[in-house]
Amino acid sequence: MARARSPLLVLFLTVFIDMVGFGIVIPVLPLYAERFQASPIAIGWLTGIYSGMQIIFTPILGKLSDRFGRRPVLMLSLAGTAIGFVLMGLAHSLLLLFVARIIAGITGGNISIPQAYIADVTTPETRSKWMGMIGAAFGLGFTFGPMIGGVMSRISYSAPFFFAAALSAANVLLLYLILPESLPHEHRAKPHEDAPLIEVFRHGTGWMFGTVVATYFFLVAGFTIMTTLFALYTERRFGYDAHANGYLFGFIGIVTVIVQGGLIGRLVRMFGERALARAGLFVTAASLALLPLCSTITWLLVACVGLSLGTGLASPPLNGLASQMIDQSWQGRALGVMQSAGSTARLIGPLLGGWLLMLDLHKPLAHYGETPFFAAALLCVVGGILAFCLKRPAADHVPETIPVGSTV
């Protein structure tokens, strides 16, 4: 494993930079779109179309990485992300802004490629630990990105997009100079073996992989309802503005980073992936149910810690289990399907949460947010129940580790 550490740390930095670029646009995009007379519905579609494109193209990028290697496809996707950000900064109409978001969504669904890289170069025993490190990079980037975007917006609304484009371009250069290829030619998918992506559900451990994907979908859908409505909830119940909510999201991100970056490896060794996934889902469900009942900042922080802890415990083991159920040449496609399920949840979650919040608008203030947050908790309970159906794949289904050094 010593030889694998250096490229894995490069992947950590790659995902961190990628997520900083993604997070930068979060506080800016709605205000930027208003310059082009975008309605709230148009802004909602502008936000959702990014995840909509990822539903389609994340598994395709994973499939391409199985065919041509992880490194070139990851570099190509980051270059496309840079182009999308440049177009956002140069946009002079709402139409061009939509085009830019579509391009960014098509090429931005690349998280499955670093995950497939990890599956290539790690043992099953250490895989969830490194999946957790990628989750930590994701959390760090998502924590610092919105803060940087807010600062850059003081220059102009276009400045954050150009800065994000520069980060993506620097990321491409970093990968070109440092990252070796992880997937040797003998393990790549062959042209004559090309098959529909639905085949991934019948490959390896079959229906068990589908159960992992469904479990992950319910986790992400429940959590995304929270992230979509959290600012509205804290504004209405606690009087918090965007600045205060930025600190709360930063707090959630930091706790998640601690769990996924520092604790997940030893916890997997102690309890195993399935037990952590189950515990994480039910802790997330309990925290979502607690959220609308909070009446003080102390209880709000307790709920935030629970959300960070729950998702931090559940997500890396689920990705680790998914990678263990699929053969080497299907890793990119399998993890691409996982992330496509996550993108679908990120599209459905906000739409469902917004509709459910309408039911609370005429309730007393103390009950504001109950309906969507309780529904989000129920989704995670369903995921937790599914997690009890998960079984560890048999040894003959666990992909072998491919040393990174042998593929340079």
Image (cartoon, rainbow, N blue to C red):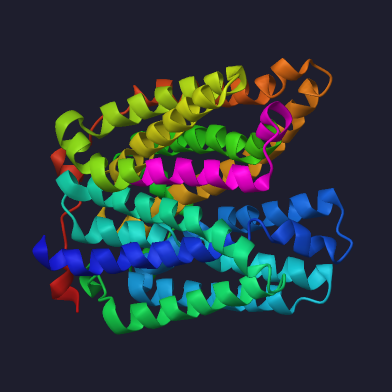
Residue 254 seen anywhere in this rendered image of the structure = yes
Q: Image height check: is 212 above or below 111?
A: above
Q: In which image quadrant can residue 388 be found?
A: top left
Please name the residue shown 73% across and 34% down the image: 354
The magenta region covers 234-257
Q: Position of residue 336 (x, y in %)?
A: 44, 54
Residue 247 painted magenta: yes
Q: Position of residue 209 (x, y in %)?
A: 36, 39
Please name the residue shown 61% across and 35% down the image: 225
Q: Position of residue 160 (x, y in %)?
A: 62, 70
Q: Position of residue 286 (x, y in %)?
A: 47, 20
Please name the residue shown 36% across and 64% down the image: 193
Horizontal side of 236 relative to 3 (left or right) equals right
**SS assignment for the magenta stretch, majority:** helix
Q: Image height check: is 243 above or below 67?
A: above
Quarter containing the C terminus: bottom left
